[in-house]
Image (spheres, grey):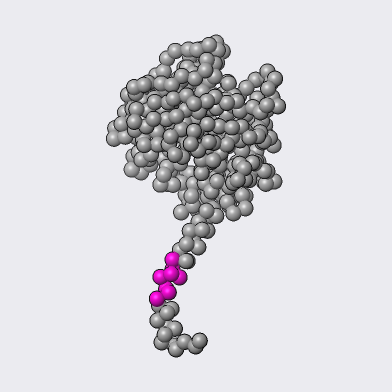
Amino acid sequence: MRLSRRRFAILLVSAAPLLLFATAASQQKRTPNKPYLVYVGTYTHKTESKGIYAYRFDPGVGKLIPFGVAAESEDPSFLVVHPSGRYLYAVNEIDHFGGQKSGAVSAFSIDPKTGKLTMLNQAATQGAGPCHISLDKTGKFALAANYDGGSIVVFPIRAGGSLAPASAFIQHSGSRVNKERQEGPHAHWIGTSPDNRLALAADLGLDEILVYRFNAAKGALTPNTPPFAKLNPGAGPRHLVFHPNGKFAYVLTEMGSSVTAFAYTASNGSLSLLQTVSTLSILRKDYAGPKEAAEIAVSPGGKFLYASNRAGIDTISAFSVDPAKGTLKLKDEYPTMGKTPRNFAIDPTGKFLLAANQESNNIVIFRIDSTTGALTPTGEIVEVPAPVCITFVAVR
């Protein structure tokens, strides 16, 4: 059937919104393949590292393109990026800063074109050896854990991204069964709850997850009721991650090489034990060597959980997550093709896992099977000295 020009024009105009919608939908589909900036925190002490390194990551093919040194800094081990994508914060895992026994937090602005970082300011953490940093959900406060000092600290973030003087500081106390590793408190991780009402801190030296009420207006911390959740004696909790649904929390224990699953009650901040499962497969049931689990992460969709094993094991363990119960089932272990996977990160698209092998000085990229959670090396290996932490920034 032939259409008159006038009728065709009317149909074209009426279809325009649909065409625009289709174009927008197509653009949205392409969004996951937009590039990201990647920053890598490192150890500079007794290594060739200069500080923080920058890369461009293409999630379409899973490739890292090096930009070089983004900022020279002393032992900038753990990193976190501001929700705006304009600022980056790093803990300087050192023992002396500003004439006191303290580590530091460094604030940087991000150049989205070059990846270069410009120092804004630094602040003393009031405790030695800070090893973890996070931001609250509003991006108005930075929270840091001092491993050697056994303490936690909160810094307000000014409008321009710099750090204001600390708004809270809490010193942990006590010891546990392992006289070498748990002679005192060792705060190893800190972060806020999904609703930002609470701050939780994993203390390796105390075998506890300490829970604090968090005042998101003032950056203040006060003990919660209940004030903590216990883990097995000598387990050594290292890092915690929440499931995307906010109903479950998973704690990686460094010394126990295990993951403990908790049901999380947001109304009162309580953690109820569900299960503890080893990060080591049945093939290692008689393994009696050192255990040093390091990092933990849940896939963006919440179907899988991953944990890394160091101490010569050098693998990443993959677990399936029961969506209703929150319990875990170990599926497999995957060699990281390097030595000492201190950290790994899942890219924002959920398609790739980047493993940071500290002692073999490389990052190895794996593709994640969306159905099984299996990891397959892509063949991409990037050299970087003593990598400790990987973080992504959307290119705007």
* 387 to the left or right of 98: right
Residue 18 drawn in magenta = yes
Identify the residue at the far left of this view.
217
Question: Residue 227 at x, y = what percent?
Answer: 37, 21
- Give the vertical position of 373 relative to 183 (above or below): below
* 75 to the left or right of 161: right
- What number of labels is visible? 0
Q: Do we see residue 206 in this rendering?
A: yes
Front residue of this view, candidates 249 and 115: 249
- Give the vertical position of 142 relative to 202 (above or below): below
Q: Do we see residue 129 in this rendering?
A: no
* 258 to the left or right of 6: right
Kindly identify the residue that appears in the image at 41 percent across and 87 percent down: 6
Residue 335 drawn in magenta = no
Kindly identify the residue that appears in the image at 59 percent across and 34 percent down: 319
Kindly identify the residue that appears in the image at 36 percent across and 43 percent down: 160
Q: Quadrant of residue 142?
A: top left
Question: Residue 374 at x, y = what percent?
Answer: 64, 41
What range of the chain is rendered magenta?
14-21
- Give the vertical position of 222 relative to 120 (above or below): above
* 67 to the left or right of 264: right
Q: Quadrant of residue 320?
A: top right
Question: Residue 162 at x, y = what percent?
Answer: 38, 39
Front residue of this view, candidates 84 and 234: 234
Front residue of this view, candidates 284 and 106: 284
Q: Main secondary structure of the magenta part?
A: helix
Question: Residue 174 at x, y = what percent?
Answer: 44, 12
